[in-house]
Amino acid sequence: MSADPTVTTWYQCDTCGYVYRPEDHDGMALGDQEKWECPTCQAGIDHFDVAVPEEIEEPHAEGQPAEAEAGSAVGEDVPTSARKVSAHRADNSVFELHRQRHKGQLVLQPSLKLPIPIIYLAEEQAGGYSVIDGQQRLTALFQYLDNIYPLGGLEVLKDLNGKRFSQLSKEGQGLLESYVLTVVRIDRESHPDIKFEVFERLNTGSVKLNDQEVRNAVYRGPYNDHLRTLARNSTFWKLLGQTDAHKRMSDVELALRFAAWYHQTYLNFGPRQLKPYLNDEMENGRRYSAKEFADLERQFKKAMDLSQTVFGSKAFKRFIPGDDGDPNGQWELKQINKALFDVVTYGFTRYNKNQIVPHSDAIFEGLVDLMSTNARFVDAITSGTAQPQRVKARFELWLDVLAKIVGDDVQQRNFSASWKEQLWKADPTCALCGQKIQTVDDAHVHHVEHYWRGGATLPQNSQLTHRFCNLSEGGGSAGETPSSGAEAAS
């Protein structure tokens, strides 16, 4: 595979592996597409991460997903001794399956539609079974047995057209009820990761399910329901730009990511890959108490409220700084950056609201500065974001900045947001390059006499610059100190 990565930016779907190349779409960048969905799996733009052409893993065959994280299938982290699925053939008559359904022992459609005729059942931890494959066939059979519709379109036994089940002869009813269907039951003892992989392989319908939709079937129960409840938080929807639940469950997946980082922390990510890490959280959630459910909901709500307070419409969006060709920076506003969502929301779980709100301006500036100046952080939120070393890097870099903001005198070193906006409205001209600063977020209030040289944080010692121009002039970067040759907050 060859391409000049400096010309266009490629993105890869983390669900099926489809690669978006602007040259294949009339040169249009992914971020400029309106309501675009992956042509292979219908995932939204939020499921695409920046991909380095040399590192792209193409799908193995059309319609078959590549692994979302390079070098690891779901089951590869499972010890060899545990890599087993316990399943057995358990053929049932239509009558018996119908009886189980009416007794609540068979969940026909676990909150999704799988248009697949093969019948596979999964044994639930609390008893009963969920239908993983074969819902349409069973639904049609059960609705007919319940007299919901008459037969129609029969080429053989045409005399039965128009008849409901109750209108069949006793013999005809008995023949239908005693007809044996081939059923495979996957036992509850099966290893969760391997069972997930089996369900992925069964998922061969016309609309390919993404990982969260598969989890919704595999991990049915109170915790799955609780995550769906979290994802309906009104502030969360506002931050995502939604007015209703996402049809492909990307909002539920974000709630799951939040829960996984909160409960397991990035320190326990280790050599794992993201998919089994999230699967572990779903499995662990089966054992959470009501108190743990309430704590998670409290933390999630706090994190969303603080994200709205500090970042508003820019929450979880990437800022791209200017360069020599154009000093003006810009926001990627059309899609959520999931890596940013992870670190920002996790960071807010570590503090109380009264510790964060007084520092809102500085926290906003701190993250924008980190995205503008720290190449390691930018790499960790844009490329190979599920790789363990990048996971650790982005969490530690942001948590370090956040701790310094909350814990020291950074407010005394930074000019207020209101003063910056006042300067920008009065004259949006950069004091260093002389060009117009297009947005207030790209403006930086510069100490005329550097703070670390004794310059005071006072209006008379301030001037407005582009972020890029300030940095080019030696203004410093997030996490640096004057001793490293740059000013921490110029």
Image (cartoon, grey):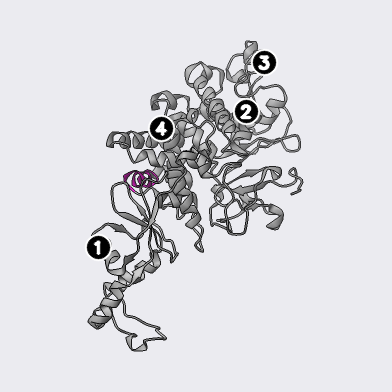
Q: Residue beneath label 2, please?
A: 444
Q: From this viewpoint, is residue 315 visible?
A: no
Q: Considering depth in this image, is 78 or 283 the residue closer to the camera?
A: 78
Circle 4 residue: 263
Closer to the eye: label 2 or 1: 1
Q: Residue at x 26, y 72 (%)?
A: 146
Q: Is residue 252 visible?
A: yes
216 w.r.t. 489: above or below: below
Q: Kindly indicate whether the residue at mark 4 contacts the one at mark 2 (C-beta within 8 angstroms).
A: no
Residue at image x 56%, y 18%?
413
Which numbered disc, 4 or 3, marks the residue closer to the eye? 4
Query: Of the residues shown, which amino acid type is indicated by label 1?
Result: His
Q: Residues within 10 Å of mark 2 (few under 14, many from 20)?
A: many
Q: Secondary structure at mark 4?
A: helix
Q: Magenta residues, as a range?
A: 221-232
- Of pointers 2 and 4, the one earlier in the residue sequence: 4
Mark 4 residue crowding within 10 angstroms, few (<14) / some (14–19) / many (20+):
some
